[in-house]
Amino acid sequence: MSSVPTYRFAPTPNGALHIGHAYSALMNVRFAAAAEGRLLLRIEDLDPTRCKREFETAIVDDLVWLGVAFADPPRRQSEHAEDYASALDALRARGLVYPCFCTRSMVVEANAGRDPDGAPRYGGACRNLAARGVDARLAAGERAVWRLDSAAARLAVPDELVWREWGEGDRETSQNADPSLWGDFVLRGRDSAASYHLAVVVDDALQGVTDVVRGRDLFAATAAHRLLQALLALPAPRYRHHRLALDAGGAKMTKSAGATPLRKLRAEGLSAQALKIALGFAVGKTRLKVELS
Ligand code: GLU
């Protein structure tokens, strides 16, 4: 692991940044500065249908406006498919992944519960298909996603799977990681070089990230990340899952639910200083109010 404390802000360029992203970026700045560390930018653009270069450009522009500076040029996930492929190959060589031919509706119909994000969990229909049949289907060009055999994977790592969590404070707690909540989660989709879970652990390791500061919405995902780190013999960063900005209705701000983009607030005259005051990163007066939870 790198000796310099290394943080990263890792937006997905599938839309505009909102106040919740500003909070996350500023949290990274705060903790990186306190640790005399460096802050890196990672562009998580693996979903070719939803990610666009113009969103990336707008994100970088918003971050400059906010005064967030990065140590190096950004790492763009779409440019590193081979890194994810070699991680997947390593797991494949150990028999811990399998191709799954099920459609989305087949996964829903199998009714195997929900993962922590509320998405249908996979029931395992393709887990034990005969190898010869699988090879023939792949050779015939049938498209598949690659899933982790999570029960086999769990047996392949030490009994105790934990992570070090600091939240927003200065006290470390040890969190039990239960990756079974995610079932046989996807490592590579039909149209992307890697799933979020695989890409994030590979990139955190390759970028030498020692400290992951991100929203509480990703708390549960850390169990899947710790399992992959243990399987791939990657270092375990420290984690800080911070509060989320709420919208006017008290729900988590999301792009999909139409959270007001920072760009729009900027156009309406919001200053970076006022936003920092509202989010607790600067002292002063502003009429902007932001609820965090
Ligand atoms: N790309 C993710 C997002 O925009 C963040 C991933 C992470 O910080 O691990 O929500």
Image: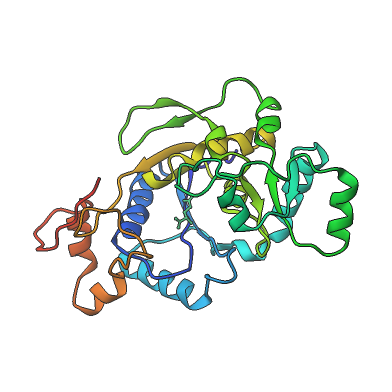
Residue that appears at 85% across and 43% down: 130
Say above or below: 283 vs 184.
below
Q: Residue 139: image x %, image y %?
A: 88, 60
In the image, residue 179 lies at what x, y percent? 56, 34
Q: Residue at x 69, y 38 (%)?
A: 149
User: Compared to 49, does 193 lie above or below?
Assistant: above
Indicate the quadrant containing the N terminus: top left, top right, bottom left or bottom right.
top right
The residue lying at 58 percent from left, 65 percent from top is: 47
Q: Nearer the viewer, residue 16 or 63?
A: 16
Quadrant the C terminus occupies: top left
For residue 260, side relative to residue 270 (left or right) = right
Q: How many marks?
A: 0
Display coloring = rainbow
Q: Is residue 151 left or right of residue 4?
A: right
The image shows residue 21 at horizontal and vertical percentages of 35, 59
- Asked where in the image residue 58 lies, by quadrant, the reply is bottom left
Q: Residue 159 in the image: x percent, y percent?
A: 61, 20
Viewer-nearest residue: 236 or 183: 183
Asked if residue 38 is positioned above or below residue 184 in the image, the reply reads: below
Residue 207 visible here: no
- In the picture as drawn, the residue positioned furthest to the top comes out as 159
Residue 32 appears in the figure: yes
Considering depth in this image, is 35 or 13 the residue closer to the camera? 13
Quarter where residue 174 is shown: top left
Q: Quadrant for residue 129, please give it.
A: top right
